Amino acid sequence: MTPGRDGGAQVPPARQRALLAAIVAAVVAVSAAIYVGVGVGAVDGTSERGTLAGGRGAQNNPAAPASTGTWVASWATAPVGGEPGTETTGLAGRSVRNVVHTSAGGTSARVTLSNLYGQSPLTVSHASIAVAAGPGTAAALADSLRPLTFAGSPSVVIPAGGQVLSDVVRISVPHDGDVLITTYSPTASGPVTYHPHARQISYVADGEHTRDATGAAYTGQSTFWRYVTALDVLGNESDGTVVVLGDSLTDGITSTAGANRRWPDVLSDRLRDAVAAGRDVPRYSVVNEGISGNQVLADGLGRPAENPSGVNRFERDVLGRTNVKVVVVALGINDILRHPGTADPDVVVAGLNVLVERAHARGLKVVGATLMPFRGHRGYTGAREAVRQAINAEIRAGRVFDGVVDFDAAVRDPYDPRRFRVEYDSGDHLHPSDRGFARMGEVFDLRDLKGGAPARL
């Protein structure tokens, strides 16, 4: 059994209470400014989410299927910033074919496209969705290729800073498979909203080739995800979504590209296999909202901020996902490494508590991860190690999260607990190897995903 959030913890000192109140106020203000106008439906899996452009999906599409089931997020990623080199023209005149890997399958789908970091409206004149013909290819299964529409129209204009949810389309989406989401923009609109560390090869073609099933036109390759931020499916495989909020250790920047070996991928596979074996665990999909370099408290530069902090992107990347049931938080190491002095562990823990309280306000359970070792990394100091240990002590004591996954204990060297075990180390002494990511996914107690937020007293 992992420790739970301890309602009997000591009242924090006045300074920490004041800091926590200030953080909460800042989060509410920032979230209201950034996300005003984004409608979010109930989390029971039956309602449609609102859109900033294009109306309300299936309700305006006479061809929308009358399928039954539960809506869940099958894949998602966090928009990080504007893609360098696209500031003036974006990707005008080119088709972008994103390859995304599913968690859950379904009989219908819908896609979220983002222009969050665009500084002008983005016109998408054509878009499509298809099941990939196999791994590592731009080719689609020909009979799976479907055009995407937006309020019944094949085109949509997404305002700067906005996003859009497509109409529902009938398509058989496999679990643990690759899906191709293709967009074409005929006009200049930059910069391109993107996720830089996809660890997945996607494709680009000159001209409008959104309905090209052969993939022959897609001679360009990309290691980014562009515009697309979520794939939802309607089906009977899952009852809800687990969202993992993390940094590069969740983003998986040292995992093998195209192999889907990030630890949330491992968790998704384990959960699906356990359900198939009849184990008493929830039927949930798992989506990865990791951003490399992400911190609990500090944003990156720009307006809107690139690489926004965990507290400032919680509304967008967690509460904005479909039918969320559980949040897994794996953040904090960058707050230590990127602090110009020595980070205050009480401040980091206060930020983590903000995330938990916001999840609880929506009835969501929160499982948190201990911070993994990093001795040997260029940023290591004894003072920073002491901060890591102090944060981990609070997490293990059950004073932060509802449940705990102890990544630190799982990957550390038993002879030097401040380091990774050699086989789990990618070589930079901070990020895991494929074996390390597998270990993280394997040590997660699936029973911790059961239940909801604790009752308020």
Image: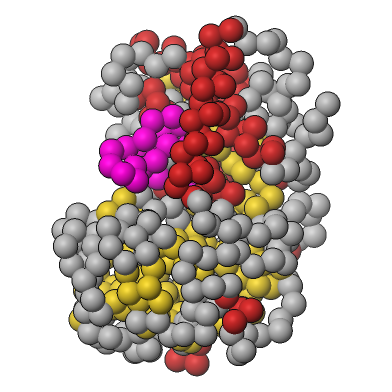
Colour mode?
A: secondary structure
Query: For this view, does 87 lie left or right of residue 337?
Result: left
The residue most toward the bottom is 143
Q: Nearer the viewer, residue 210 or 312?
A: 312
Q: How far across and how far down the image is residue 378, in percent?
A: 26, 25
Is residue 290 located in the magenta-colored stretch of the structure?
Answer: yes
- Is 321 situated above or below 428? below
Q: Residue at x 71, y 84 (%)?
A: 66
Q: Residue at x 34, y 31 (%)?
A: 429
Q: How far across and how far down the image is residue 130, in percent?
A: 46, 81
Q: How far across and how far down the image is residue 300, in percent?
A: 32, 37
Q: Residue at x 76, y 51 (%)?
A: 281
- Is 185 situated above or below 347? below
Q: Residue at x 58, y 72 (%)?
A: 56
Question: Where the C terminus falls, by quadrant?
Answer: top right
Q: Nearer the viewer, residue 241 or 350?
A: 350
Q: How far across and how far down the image is residue 61, in percent?
A: 59, 85
Query: For this view, does 275 lie left or right of residue 117?
Result: right
Is residue 36 located in the magenta-colored stretch of the structure?
Answer: no
Q: Is residue 213 visible?
A: yes
Span shown in magenta: 289-310
Image quadrant in which you'd find residue 162: bottom left
Looking at the magenta stretch, what is its main secondary structure? Answer: loop
